[in-house]
Image (tube, grey):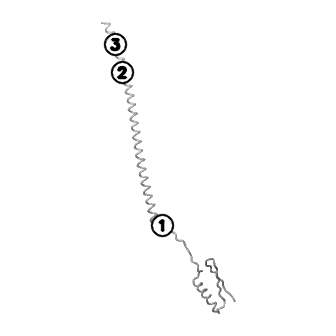
């Protein structure tokens, strides 16, 4: 017997071999194998099921909506923080102004005290002069 080709079909670890003859004449016993062979050639692939894994595809709309929500939340937080920072800056400016006013008042008080002391000293000097003048005047009379 002349054989033209050999095909190996694997099915669950078992292997079956099928042969075809080179001549067109076949026996009845070979017809059953030829029909299987012809079926195999018509299908064009071994009788093996291809298994593919199905992956879940998340719609882009949901992802985009989540990202948009996160961005909105971040922007709101940033706005709140900016307002707080601005309020703190304003408070600091107010405190600085209050401190400057207190310092000016203290300086004015010190100046006023100095002026008062100078005036008191001048008055005391004038009193002394007047006392001396009065005594001298009294003596002359």
At 52% from the left edge and 71% from the top edge, which residue is drawn? Answer: 54
Question: For this rendering, which residue is in front, 102 or 40?
Answer: 40
The residue where tag 1 is placed is: 58
Mark 2–mark 3 Cα distance, whole angstroms, equals 16 Å
Please tell me whether mark 1 or mark 3 is closer to you in this view: 1
At 45% from the left edge and 64% from the top edge, which residue is drawn? Answer: 62
10 over 132 or under it: above or below: below
Please tell me whether mark 1 or mark 2 is closer to you in this view: 1
89 over 38 or under it: above or below: above
Q: Secondary structure at mark 2?
A: helix
**Pointers 1 and 3 in contact (C-beta within 8 Å):** no
Residue 66 image offset from top left, x and y in percent: 45, 61
Q: Secondary structure at mark 1?
A: loop
Q: Earlier in the sequence, mark 2 or mark 3?
A: 2
Q: Quadrant of residue 20?
A: bottom right
At 34% from the left edge and 16% from the top edge, which residue is drawn? Answer: 127
- The image's mark for residue 43 is none
Mark count: 3
Q: Residue furthest right?
A: 1
* Side of 100 relative to 37 (left or right): left
- The image's mark for residue 131 is 3
Residue 120 image offset from top left, x and y in percent: 36, 21
131 over 33 or under it: above or below: above
Q: Earlier in the sequence, mark 1 or mark 2?
A: 1
Question: For this rendering, which residue is in front, 85 or 16?
Answer: 16
Mark 1–mark 2 Cα distance, whole angstroms, equals 92 Å
The residue where tag 2 is placed is: 120
In the rendered image, the quadrant that contains the N terminus is bottom right
In the rendered image, the quadrant that contains the C terminus is top left
């Amino acid at each position: 017997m002349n054989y033209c080709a050999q095909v190996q079909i694997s099915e669950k670890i078992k292997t079956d071999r099928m042969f075809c003859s080179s001549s067109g004449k076949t026996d009845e016993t070979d017809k059953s194998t030829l029909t299987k062979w012809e079926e195999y050639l018509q299908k064009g692939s071994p009788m093996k099921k291809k298994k593919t894994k199905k992956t879940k595809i998340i719609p882009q709309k949901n992802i985009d909506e989540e990202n948009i929500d996160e961005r909105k939340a971040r922007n709101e937080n940033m706005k709140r923080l900016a307002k707080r920072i601005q309020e703190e800056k304003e408070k600091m400016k107010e405190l600085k102004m209050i401190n400057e006013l207190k310092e000016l008042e203290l300086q004015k008080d010190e100046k006023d005290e100095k002026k008062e002391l100078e005036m008191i000293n001048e008055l005391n000097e004038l009193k002394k002069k007047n006392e001396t003048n009065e005594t001298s005047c009294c003596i002359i009379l």
